[in-house]
Amino acid sequence: MAKPTDTRTRILAVARELFVRQGVRETSLREIADRLGITKPALYYHFASREDLVRSIVEPMMDGMERFVAEREPRDGAGPAAHDPRELLGDYFDLAWEHRDVLVMVIRELPVLAPLELGERMFSWRRRLILLLLGPEPTTAAQIAATVALGGMSDCAVEYAHLPLEQVKGPAVEAAVAALTAVPA
Amino acid sequence: MAKPTDTRTRILAVARELFVRQGVRETSLREIADRLGITKPALYYHFASREDLVRSIVEPMMDGMERFVAEREPRDGAGPAAHDPRELLGDYFDLAWEHRDVLVMVIRELPVLAPLELGERMFSWRRRLILLLLGPEPTTAAQIAATVALGGMSDCAVEYAHLPLEQVKGPAVEAAVAALTAVPA
DNA sequence: GTCTATACCATGATAGAC
DNA sequence: GTCTATCATGGTATAGAC
């Protein structure tokens, strides 16, 4: 157990704020170090590289996303579990909202995060999420509708981040459900 | 009139491909120059800076988007022009599809493009587009639904870029129309 | 275990020769 | 219109002080 305000934690907090506000590659390590009153190499004691620092910030969200689908996938051997689209989309919205600052960072900077193989991981759980919504072997048309639903909701969690959750969630989920059910699976 | 394969044009083509494939900041000017068999300073003869190069690639898409809304906005003094949502969303999809390579670049690298004030411009025409869809003074809930529709369609133009237009457009527009009309304006 | 001092290399950018 | 030479900056990495 580390102390509540140890250097590592403070670095993570400052880096996260600057990365989200002005971009990952637009934030120099010097800038982070200056903000904390330490030197650049001191960062390298706590994090092996810039990539390591980014990874430590992004990992919790990725874990959350992957756990979300894993928990809802049918147990091995069991038939496909039925999921109410409204409930599933609503729960997904809550998760996207919870991680909205890191989510915007990931969406807006995929190229920077490519070395972390984030693209592949996102693509994977997004695909699994679509299967949960549509059942096995959905048509291409249905997958496209699901993409509108999921992508649109993610956009809302990011674009209306300044509003209270209760005001955004309802309309966003209603619209997503409508998009999803507009095309037969 | 420039010759069909002058250096400037070749630079733009190569830069565009590399920027889209591996990211703007992940592509060095050296890499672009090497690919063309010229040196870095030669690039600086044709473009004042890296930013100028990026701007030249992004500008046509931004112009297209801004013209799209301007053409459809009511003439000064006239009442709000009525727009069929399905038609408007369909036309917008065509435009997003046409510029999908640059669009993915802009969406995925907003921080890199911040100096070009692209965020403000995108926000502006997106807002105007929402007004065209919903009429003046829409509720927040309706705006959220419109964001799901527009954001979801953009995602589709990017994610299903490898499929033929005819296969993607239909389902994407249907889903977007459903999302938009799910919430009262 | 925590940090400073220092060096190294790639990059964006400019000046001036051809 | 293109090149050689050069500079400042910033990411990375190591050596060593405390």
Image (cartoon, coloured by chain):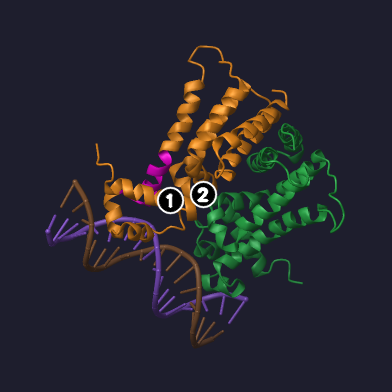
Chain colours: A orange, B green, C brown, D purple
Going from N to C along the chain, the mark reached first, 1 or 2, is: 1
Residue A128 is tagged as none
User: Quarter of the image containing the C terminus of chain B?
Assistant: top right
Mark 1 and mark 2: Cα distance apart in space: 15 Å
Secondary-structure class at tag 2: loop
Main secondary-structure element of the magenta-colored stretch: helix
Task: Please tell me which residue is depicted at 57% across the width and 25% down the height of the picture.
Answer: A88
Residue A109 is tagged as 2
Residue type at tag 2: Glu
Query: Residue B145 appears at what percent x and percent y?
Result: 68, 37
Query: Residue A44 appears at what percent x and percent y?
Result: 29, 53
Task: Please tell me which residue is depicted at 74% across the width and 46% down the height of the picture.
Answer: B137
Question: Which residue does the numbered mark 1 point to in the structure image?
Answer: A17
Secondary-structure class at tag 1: helix
What's the magenta region?
A: A47-59
Displayed quadrant of residue B54: bottom right
Chain at numbered mark 1: A
State if disc 2 and disc 1 touch (CB < 8 Å).
no
Task: Please tell me which residue is depicted at 45% across the width and 37% down the height of the picture.
Answer: A61
Residue type at tag 1: Glu
Left or right position of B42 against B84: left
